Amino acid sequence: MTAVFSHGRLRLYLLKLLDDGPKHGYELIRLLEDRFLGLYAPSAGTIYPRLQRLEVEGLVSHTAAGGRKTYDITDAGRAELRQRAGELTALETDIAASVADLSSLAGEIRSEVRGSARDLKRELSEATRRARWEAPAPPPRPASTGGPQTELLGELDQRLAAFTAEVGRLMRARQFSDTQLRTAIRLLDGALDGLRRLLR
């Protein structure tokens, strides 16, 4: 759990959210995730035990409908919120600071990922260029009378050239995610392995 909610502060914030109206547990999780701009979301295992504890203490109550519990703050819960108004203000300030820190960190991570994707794309482009220009010359083909095999070899050469050109065009077309680039590398490696096995 994020440090901003240490020392029972999540309990206080749940009361604050329920003071705005009745909610079920997953609504509370979503509201917390929204408050942290999607950078933090408590698990159900974090939220529900606290709601049960608040209920035992008489600060919230619940109603059940359709297999789902909806929690509501009680008068005792509102009284606790009033008594701890100063703590709640400090908590809101800490949450805002935590969100700013998390946003900054997320920005740095995104920047590093973009850099990694650019590096991987550059390496893949370079590998494609090397494979294209540094590949050993194929052994001379046996003399042929121009039968079906010659036609097929010519078609294979055309397909390889078209494939290389298309890969180059796709690489220049747009930015790729790390996952897409890794998948592309695996596909190329798999195709090459398959051809090696076929042509042994």
Image: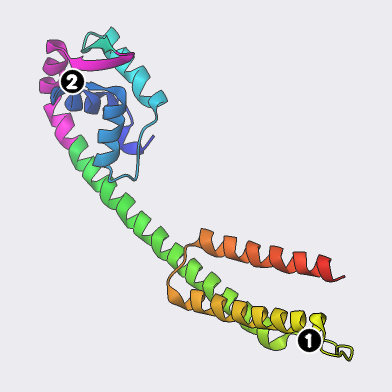
Residue type marked 1: Pro
Identify the magenta region: 66-90
- Where is residue 66 drawn, in percent x and y? 30, 13
User: How are the residues colored?
Assistant: rainbow
> Residue at position x 43%, y 70% from top?
175
Residue at the location (44% across, 75% down)? 173
Q: CA distance from mark 1 to mark 2?
A: 72 Å
User: Earlier along the polypeptide chain: callout 1 or callout 2?
Assistant: 2
- Describe residue 65's horizontal placement relative to residue 46 as left or right: left
Secondary structure of the magenta portion, mostly?
helix
87 on left or right of 105: left
Q: Is residue 134 above or below residue 119?
A: below
Say which residue label 2 marks.
Answer: 22
User: The C terminus appears in which quarter of the rendering?
Assistant: bottom right
Q: Residue at x 14, y 23 (%)?
A: 21
Which residue: 80% across, 69% down?
196
The disc labelled 2 sits on which kind of residue?
Pro
Q: Is residue 34 above or below residue 76?
A: below
- Circles 1 and 2, Cβ within 8 Å, touching? The answer is no
Helix, strand or loop under label 1 = loop
Res 54 visible: yes
Q: Quadrant of the N terminus?
A: top left
Seen from the viewer's position, the closer of residues 29 and 77 is: 29
Q: Image quadrant of residue 67?
A: top left
Label 2: state its secondary structure: loop
Which mark identifies residue 75?
none
Give the image location of residue 43, x and y in percent. 39, 30
Location of residue 77 (image quadrant): top left
Left or right, residue 195 beside residue 73: right
Q: In the rendered image, which residue does mark 1 sit on?
A: 136
Is residue 70 a member of the stretch shown in magenta?
Answer: yes
